[in-house]
Amino acid sequence: MPDLSARSCAAPASPIRRLYPLAREAKRRGKKVYHLNIGQPDIHTPEAFLRGIREAQLDVLAYAPSQGLEQTVEALAGYYERCGLPVGENEILVTTGGSEAITFALTVSCDPGDRVLVPEPFYPNYQGYARLTNVEVAPITTRREDGFHLPSLSELRRAVDARTRALLFSHPGNPTGVVYTEEELETLVELALEHDLFIIADEVYREFVYEGAHRSLLSYPEVEDRVILVDSISKRLSACGARVGVFVSRNKEVMTAAGKCATIRLSAPTFGQLGLAAFLADPQHERVIEAMIQQFRRRRDVLCEALADVPGVTFRKPEGAFYIMVGLPVSDAEAFVRWMLTDFPEEETLMLAPGAGFYATPGRGGDEARMAYVLNEEDLLRATSALHRGLASYAKTAGAPASP
Ligand SMILES: Cc1ncc(COP(=O)(O)O)c(C=O)c1O
């Protein structure tokens, strides 16, 4: 057999999904596994969205235009206008999830061998998109004790070199839940201007903000020609399977280049776009989103309160999104996550995403894990209780040193 490409071999397996076979096996043995490892909300997809799909009158399930269905692009322009981010319809491209929007953003901003600065811990697929486009992730380390807020401008400057072309970050953050302050955003703006960088602002959690206010990078006029806004309905509408995301830029050349990428892959999914257009046409849609945000806020509060009682677990209350990165009183979080699925001798257990996979710097995140508060409050409490008992019993297990 011919050799596989180096880049496909180097693309990392997702730390979020990698341990699934162990969870499947645990379930086969009759265990209840609480999945806090993945950002798949249990909340129902809004009825107006599903109705838009159910009631679609189609004789042929045709390709959508590469830019997106006309009514979807128009509805999105209205949505951004209501968010205080006026963009023209020609500044919007509907993509196959936020994932494709990020791949397009890296493709139009970087050549093979270029570097993209990414605050770590980061959404692990950033590493995957970068590998597939032959771009190098240059991490900027942020720390749990700082609530994963950014380091100073001088530290950020040190991370830039001649090959650095772009900044990429999720805001609010996955896995950190961080929402940057105006001061931090201004620092990023200054860095981008100083070093002529594109800003790829992944705002797929843009409405899930519980502390402070979220300001979009697109609202800074001085960088509007270099900001690429990445958006998605996967989480905000609990519609992960619709595979609809958005690429937004006010830069004509960027849109032309991204438009070429879009024609190469033909079109984004038609049904998802129909659902989105129907949802945004529903006069109740803002209320539906607001109710979802309140639900996640309660879940965050319930989870944080419960975690505060688990000895050795350290965290800062996240400000947004629906994740929390916790420090665990173990030296190897992945070994503990595995053990919870293979050896924890109780009927209920939980699955977490081990922290190391969220970092590009070797050795970082080994004692951390990400929890996604995507389950109902009762399940979150049961899962935290399993974590509490699991840590206690793991500490007593031979070969599992506890290091609180
Ligand atoms: C920060 C972030 N960006 C992008 C994505 C990609 O999502 P999708 O392709 O479903 O829009 C995710 C999914 O979890 C995410 O957390």
Image (tube, rainbow, N blue to C red):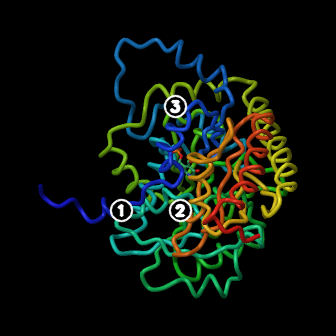
Taking the spot 45% from the left edge, 41% from the top edge, the residue there is 96
Taking the spot 63% from the left edge, 63% from the top edge, the residue there is 398
What residue type is disc 3 on? Answer: Arg
The earlier-in-sequence mark between 3 and 2 is: 3
214 relative to 22 in the view: left or right: right
Taking the spot 58% from the left edge, 39% from the top edge, the residue there is 234
Give the Cα separation between the discs numbered 1 and 2: 19 Å
Disc 3: which residue? 28
What residue type is disc 2 on? Answer: Gly
Disc 1: which residue? 133
Residue 34 position, x and y percent, is: 66, 39
What residue type is disc 1 on? Answer: Thr
Task: For mark 2, give the secondary structure.
Answer: helix
- Marks 1 and 2: which is nearer the front? 2
Taking the spot 30% from the left edge, 64% from the top edge, the residue there is 7
Q: Indicate the quadrant where residue 200 lies.
A: bottom right
353 in relation to 222, above or below: above
- Marks 3 and 2: which is nearer the front? 3
Query: Marks 3 and 1: CB-CB under 8 Å?
Result: no
Residue 38 position, x and y percent, is: 59, 45
Residue 336 position, x and y percent, is: 62, 57
The quadrant of the picture occupied by the C terminus is: bottom right
Depth check, front residue: 24 or 110: 24
Give the Cα separation between the discs numbered 3 and 2: 27 Å
63 relative to 92 in the view: left or right: left
Number of other residues with Cα within 10 Å of mark 2, as a class: few under 14, some 14 to 19, many 20 or more? many
Image mark for residue 357: 2
Image mark for residue 87: none
Depth check, front residue: 84 or 158: 158
Q: Indicate the quadrant where residue 178 lies.
A: bottom right
